[in-house]
């Protein structure tokens, strides 16, 4: 299982593509604070060969803060404290060798959101699978116990030690609403020391696994401007003041009827439903993914891929199509005006 975590997380950091900064999940830019609790499992010189031995299980809890820099990458600062227990039955001696203790570690962990990395972010998505890896420092207190049959436990050694700790793991986050998240995570925490159990032997590094169940609260972040008011090509508009000229007396003339030819609209309006930077999806894949009935058109500009539907000279028809896309759950929807077949500006819709 530990090798599987390494194969999942390390290649992702090496080959991840840069996400679009304009189209991101609701967590992007926000800070979260939370707590977690769960069992921890010791592995070392005084642990049995069973996968989850009862004598090696303790309880741990943590406080953490988490910041999502983008729809994929984040950083978590965590303070974790837990118990230590281990026991090894010696076949050639009629006694068990055991230890007990406590540990505290502080770590900085990078996180990578696999759900948003391998598929476009959906506005309605609530469940996210992620990987994490980091580095920190741990301090622990532990003591050896010599448990003899029919004799009470006798303390033989007590030590306080510290070392660097390397956590790596995988987890899942579920957004209950915009403010509250719940999550579950398994981390494999390698201590760069063989003294966690007060026994130097076959294990070069002692290990503690932590199965965490937690909850976190959204503290908010940098406020973003409403996307409907952001122009691709902003224009500066200044008020013009006209001087009032003196009134001029004009002799009335007979009324004339002049035929005014109708003039077609100057712009062609399309609805943009999504855009991605360095993610090249086909127009048909986007249409099926977002369950759009209308044909989808792909526009490529450098590394940016934009996807539009419709094409109207009437602004009201374009606005109705925009509202229809919003009902499908696509929130980043814009009406774009084209002139002579060239993208001209984004239409501001209040």
Image (cartoon, rainbow, N blue to C red):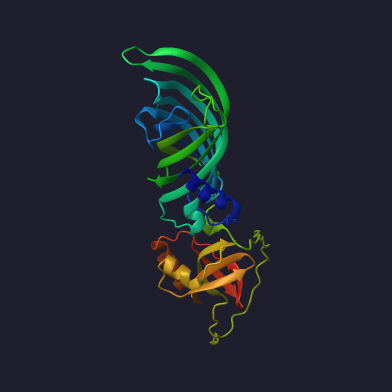
Give the camera-side residue of 293 and 1: 1
Task: State whether residue 319 appears in this view.
Answer: no
Report x, y in % for residue 276. 55, 62
Between 288 and 321, the one nearer to me in the picture: 288
Question: Which one is in front, 305 or 144?
Answer: 144
Quarter of image, res 34: top left
Q: Residue furthest left?
A: 150
- Residue at 55% x, 52% y is 12
Residue visible at 53% across and 18% down in the picture: 160
Nearest the viewer among 176 and 116 is 116
For residue 41, what is the image quadrant?
A: top left
Q: Residue at 63% across / 77% down in the picture?
A: 250
Quarter of the figure that contains the N terminus: top left
Q: Is residue 298 left or right of residue 215?
A: right
**Does residue 92 sit above or below 122 in this rendering?**
above
Where is 272 relative to 90, above or below?
below
Q: Residue furthest front?
A: 92
Q: Could you tell whether 238 is left or right of 266 in the image?
A: right
**Looking at the image, is 234 positioned above or below residue 214?**
below
Q: Position of residue 180 (x, y in %)?
A: 40, 41
Residue appearing at x 47%, y 54% in the figure: 115
Q: Residue 95, image x and y in percent? A: 38, 19
Q: Is residue 54 visible?
A: yes
Residue 57 at x, y percent in the picture:
38, 29
Quadrant assignment, res 149? top left
| Rendered position, 94 above or below 44 | above
């Amino acid at each position: 299982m530990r090798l599987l975590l390494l194969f999942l997380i390390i290649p992702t950091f090496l080959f991840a593509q840069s996400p679009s900064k304009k189209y991101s999940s609701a967590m992007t830019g926000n800070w979260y604070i939370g707590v977690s609790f769960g069992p921890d499992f010791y592995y070392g010189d005084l642990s049995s060969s069973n996968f989850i031995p009862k004598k090696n299980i303790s309880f741990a809890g943590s406080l953490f803060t988490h910041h999502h820099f983008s729809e994929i990458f984040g950083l978590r600062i965590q303070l974790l404290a837990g118990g230590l227990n281990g026991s090894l039955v010696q076949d050639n001696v009629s006694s068990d060798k055991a230890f007990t203790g406590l540990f505290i570690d502080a770590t900085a962990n990078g996180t990578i959101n696999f759900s948003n990395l391998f598929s476009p972010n959906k506005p309605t998505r609530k469940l996210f699978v992620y990987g994490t890896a980091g580095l920190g420092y741990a301090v622990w207190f532990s003591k050896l116990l010599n448990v003899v049959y029919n004799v009470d436990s006798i303390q033989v050694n007590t030590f306080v030690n510290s070392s660097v700790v390397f956590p790596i793991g995988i987890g899942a986050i579920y957004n209950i609403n915009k403010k509250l998240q719940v999550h579950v995570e398994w981390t494999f925490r390698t201590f760069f020391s063989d003294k966690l159990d007060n026994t130097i032997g076959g294990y070069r590094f002692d290990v503690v696994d932590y199965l965490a169940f937690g909850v976190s609260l959204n503290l908010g972040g940098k406020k973003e401007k409403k996307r409907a008011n952001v122009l691709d090509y902003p224009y500066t508009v200044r008020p013009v003041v006209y001087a009032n000229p003196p009134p001029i007396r004009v002799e009335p003339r007979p009324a004339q009827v002049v035929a005014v030819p109708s003039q077609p609209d100057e712009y062609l309006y399309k609805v943009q439903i999504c855009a991605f930077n360095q993610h090249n999806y086909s127009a048909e894949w986007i249409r099926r993914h977002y369950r759009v009935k209308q044909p989808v058109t792909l526009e490529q500009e450098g590394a940016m891929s934009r996807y539009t539907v419709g094409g109207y000279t009437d602004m009201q028809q374009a606005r109705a199509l925009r509202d229809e896309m919003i009902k499908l759950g696509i929130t980043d929807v814009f009406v774009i005006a084209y002139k002579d077949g060239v993208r001209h500006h984004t239409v501001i819709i209040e």
